Amino acid sequence: MRRASVRLFRPIATTLTLINLMVWSMPMAADNDESRGHDDSQLTREIEAFLATYAEVYNRQDYTTLLSMWDQGDPDPIYVAEEINPPMQGWDRINAYFKPKPGFSVLDGIRNEYTDINAHYLAENLAIATYKLRFDIKVKNKRAMSSWDRVMAVFRKKNGEWKLIAYAEAPMAPLTMVREMIHGQVPDDFDAWIDQQDAGRQ
């Protein structure tokens, strides 16, 4: 998540269509015998470790290292950022997104956190994962802001290491997101407070 024009409510239909087309057009699909019998819990731990490193690299804005965590041999990677339309396909666009000008940054700082990670195998060396991205971001000459996204990503294992080949941010619909924000502001002790008030009226 970056760039000066951060828009939180991009439609996600194109995102999901691209991911579905990419995944199901691959030669080894999810019902291939080679994808069965794998331990998805172990896979999830591996993706959690990958994303912990990815966040650390992203947060220090080391985009050269970050891009090395993608499969550079893939001819047509996909990156769907919530604030960019249409989705970015191919290395030219993805490289330009992360490094628009050598030695120049549009951000004063960014902090990404990845949680609620779930992954499963699609094939022997192919996996898909969903997770939550929470971010704090400060664009130069702008006020800092925070928000969150749902993410779907596809990984390929090469030389024993997982690499990204597709990534898509999927913000919730505005009404749903506002409802989540309102509910999230309720203090943890509120239910107990209500019970105490009810007891005092009896």
Image (cartoon, helix red, strand yellow):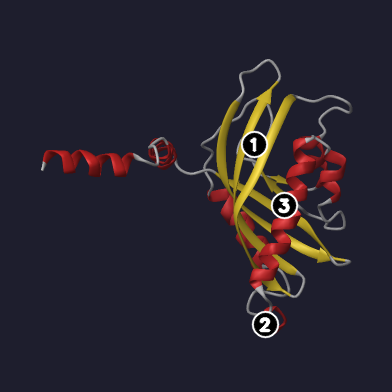
Q: Of the residues under marks 3 and 1, which one precedes in the sequence?
A: 3
- Label 2 packing within 10 angstroms: few (<14), some (14-19), many (20+): few
Tell me residue 184's x, y (percent): 43, 39
| The image quarter in which residue 152 lies | bottom right
Question: Residue at position x 69%, y 63% from top?
Answer: 45
Q: Secondary structure at mark 3?
A: helix
Dot 3 and dot 1 residues touching (CB under 8 Å): no
Question: Residue at position x 39%, y 36% from top?
Answer: 182
At label 1, the amino acid type is: Ile
| The image quarter in which residue 35 lies | bottom right
At label 2, the amino acid type is: Gly
Question: Residue at position x 60%, y 51% from top?
Answer: 115
**Closer mark to the observer between disc 2 and disc 1:** 2
Q: Is residue 119 left or right of residue 198?
A: right
Distance in Å between CA atoms under marks 3 and 1:
22 Å
Q: Nearer the viewer, residue 73 or 52?
A: 52
Q: Is residue 199 above or below residue 20?
A: above
Distance in Å between CA atoms under marks 3 and 2:
24 Å
Tell me residue 198's x, y (percent): 17, 42
Dot 3 and dot 2 residues touching (CB under 8 Å): no
At label 3, the amino acid type is: Leu
Question: Residue at position x 75%, y 37% from top?
Answer: 59
**In the rendered image, which residue does mark 2 sit on?**
37
Q: Secondary structure at mark 2?
A: loop
Q: Of the residues under marks 3 and 2, which one precedes in the sequence?
A: 2
Q: Quadrant of the C terminus?
A: top left
**In the rendered image, which residue does mark 3 sit on?**
51
Tell me residue 34's x, y (percent): 72, 81
**In the rendered image, which residue does mark 1 sit on?**
84
Q: Quadrant of the N terminus?
A: top right
